[in-house]
Image: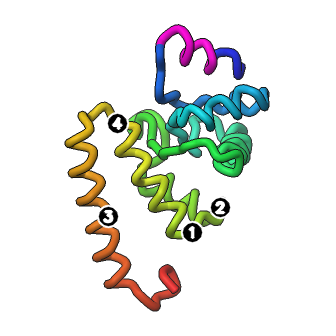
Amino acid sequence: SARNTITCIDLLDCERIDHGYFVLEDDAAVTRCRDEGIMFTCVFTTSRRAWRPFRRASIKAMSEAGLRICLGADDPGMFPTTLTAEYMIAGEALGWDRKKLTETCLNSIEASWMDPEEKRGWRAAFIKEIGVIDAETAGSPANP
């Protein structure tokens, strides 16, 4: 439930919640998480095919509500996915553009437990590499 997310924030001082899709049940919880910049690590692919449309709709709603999201692949040995596949779903099924995908990628750095200096270094390296990729693919259908 959304209450579980709030309990994690209040009692455990969590700054990142893995999954947390049920936060959407409570508008006040969504507002609080958005205002406090709580990061949600989300995964589209589950072991149960019936849950996949729910997950996609939930992640899309979380994003549209302004919640900070990064994508993960849970445990690729147990779940039929990879991080690449999760980003492909975000782009193709949810229609996230390059800007949104880049933001989500950079959120993963912020969600990590690296120290701030390491985060700055990784963020700069990611931004530089994304710039190289953008330059190499400029004008392609994937990068109009």
Which numbered disc, 4 or 3, marks the residue that appears first in the sequence?
4
- Type of amino acid at the residue the image marks with label 4: Ser
Local secondary structure at mark 2:
loop
Q: Is residue 65 magenta?
A: no
Judging by the rendered image, the residue that carries numbered circle 4 is 112
Tell me the magenta residue range: 5-12
72 left or right of 31 in image:
left
Q: In this view, does 87 lie above or below 95?
A: above
Horizontal and vertical percent position of residue 97: 57, 69
Three-letter code, disc 1? Asp
Magenta highlight on residue 10: yes
78 or 43: which is nearer to us?
43
Which residue is painted at 55% across and 43% down in the image? Answer: 68
Q: Is residue 131 left or right of residue 8?
A: left
Q: Name the residue that disc number 3 marks.
A: 127
Q: How far apart are marks 2 and 4 (CA)?
A: 26 Å
Q: Is residue 19 left or right of residue 107?
A: right
Tell me the element at label 4.
loop
Label for residue 97? Answer: 1
The mark that comes first in sequence, 1 or 4, is 1
Residue at mark 4 to residue at mark 3: CA–CA distance: 17 Å
Three-letter amino acid code of the residue under disc 2: Ala
Image point 48% across, 53% down: which residue? 104
